[in-house]
Amino acid sequence: MLCRCLLFWILLRRADSFSVTVPSSPVLVVRGATALLPCEFEPNANALVITWQREEDARVVHSFYYERDQLERQSSDYFNRTKLNHKEFAKGNASLSIASFGLKDAGKYLCIVSNSKGSDRGVVHLVYAAFYSEPRLSILLKSTDVTVQYETEGYPRPEVMWLGSGGQNLTDHLEVSSASDGGLFYLKSSYIAQSPAFNVTFTLKNPAVHQKLQRHVNVSYDGNMSSRTSVVVLSVLCFFLLCSTGLLLWLYCRDRRK
Ligand SMILES: *[C@@H]1O[C@H](CO)[C@@H](O)[C@H](O)[C@H]1NC(C)=O
Ligand SMILES: *[C@@H]1O[C@H](CO)[C@@H](O)[C@H](O)[C@H]1NC(C)=O
Ligand SMILES: *[C@@H]1O[C@H](CO)[C@@H](O)[C@H](O)[C@H]1NC(C)=O
Ligand SMILES: *[C@@H]1O[C@H](CO)[C@@H](O)[C@H](O)[C@H]1NC(C)=O
Ligand SMILES: *[C@@H]1O[C@H](CO)[C@@H](O)[C@H](O)[C@H]1NC(C)=O
């Protein structure tokens, strides 16, 4: 009841000269970061009421009146994540911070401020993005071809290209799953080479966060059994053999000591 009266009062006072200032362009917030939603008003007046809510569905994000935070009607989506800096009110700063920013927090927020001078509102638009993680490489060797594949997660959909050694655009295979609950796209991109010797470069761009990744894969083949691939396989095998022999010896010695 009290809130409804306040809201009514806020609406009545809208025509006044009192004004609220918010950024006109969208604010980018990276996954997991603390978002700062700027909102400024003309200070030095009594009866300050600040309400932050989602524009889309009027969910209450944070409110302040009677000189204190009022969180009874706060949406559970924002529980324990929001903060208004009371010390800043005297300067006319009603900026809100939201911790652990995620995909579901992207959208429009209303900053409604009223005091004895008047009332006004502004809309702050928050945009979500996530850096793509270090791409994981896998190589599949077949008798007919070689598949090079990278997997990574981020947001939003990136621009992916595979380039040949001369910088030419190669045809690739790209799969991007829909965003998970964690707010990340899962991306899998592969290039199939018809020859066992090739140089390719995987490039990924996430323009939202100015991220550019470039990874080279150089595969060579000298045509006989002592090829580099076999040498690598053999070295890995030898390494494991040595390790397991060492482990067995160690276990044996330890048991003998007991
Ligand atoms: C609120 O968040 C703080 C740290 O951000 C945490 O220590 C505290 O346990 C949380 N409280 C509840 C009730 O979740
Ligand atoms: C408003 O307050 C926030 C802290 O709540 C601070 O980070 C920000 O710099 C302040 N803005 C201005 C314009 O002073
Ligand atoms: C891999 O190939 C690229 C050309 O595609 C070349 O610029 C780069 O130096 C090569 N890297 C190695 C380690 O040979
Ligand atoms: C590269 O080739 C793909 C199709 O193979 C095409 O969709 C893409 O637009 C090309 N990119 C550039 C920068 O030419
Ligand atoms: C790959 O790059 C290396 C180093 O730049 C070069 O020596 C080799 O010839 C290239 N191989 C192919 C198949 O282009």
Image (cartoon, rainbow, N blue to C red):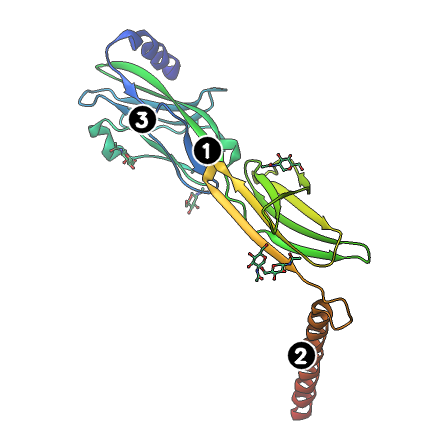
Dot 1 amino acid type: Tyr
In screen coordinates, is 24 left or right of 235? left
Q: Position of residue 4 (x, y in %)?
A: 39, 13
Q: CA distance from mark 2 to mark 3?
A: 62 Å
The residue indicated by pointer 3 is 39
Where is residue 49? Give x, y as percent. Answer: 30, 21
Q: Tally the numbered discs.
A: 3
Of the two numbered discs 1 and 3 in the rendering, the one whose residue sits closer to the viewer: 3
Given the image, on which type of amino acid does mark 3 rest? Cys
Local packing at callout 2 (Cα closer than 10 Å; few below 14, some 14-19, many 20+) is few
- For the N terminus, the quadrant is top left
Residue with the mark numbered 1: 78
Q: Quadrant of the C terminus?
A: bottom right
Q: Label 2 belongs to which residue?
A: 243
Q: Residue at x 81, y 55 (%)?
A: 144
**Distance from label 2 to label 1 (Cα)?**
51 Å
Query: Residue 249 is drawn in which quadrant?
Result: bottom right
Q: Is residue 12 above or below residue 217?
A: above
Residue 221: tell me if it is visible: yes
**Residue at disc 3, secondary structure:** loop
Decide if residue 179 is on the left or right side of residue 141.
left
Instruction: Check if mark 1's residue and mark 3's residue have beta carbons within 8 Å.
Output: no
For disc 1, the neighbor class at 10 Å (few under 14, some 14 to 19, many from 20) is some
Could you say whether the residue bearing mark 2 is in a helix, strand or loop? Answer: helix
Residue 62 image position (x, y, % from top left)? 39, 28
Expressed as whole percent of the image width and height from the top left, the position of residue 207 reads: 49, 37
Identify which residue is drawn at 58% across, 45% down. Answer: 153
Which one is in front, 143 or 224?
224
Q: Depth check: 11 or 242 in front?
A: 242
Q: Say which of marks 2 and 1 sits in front.
A: 2
Pair 2/3: label in front: 2
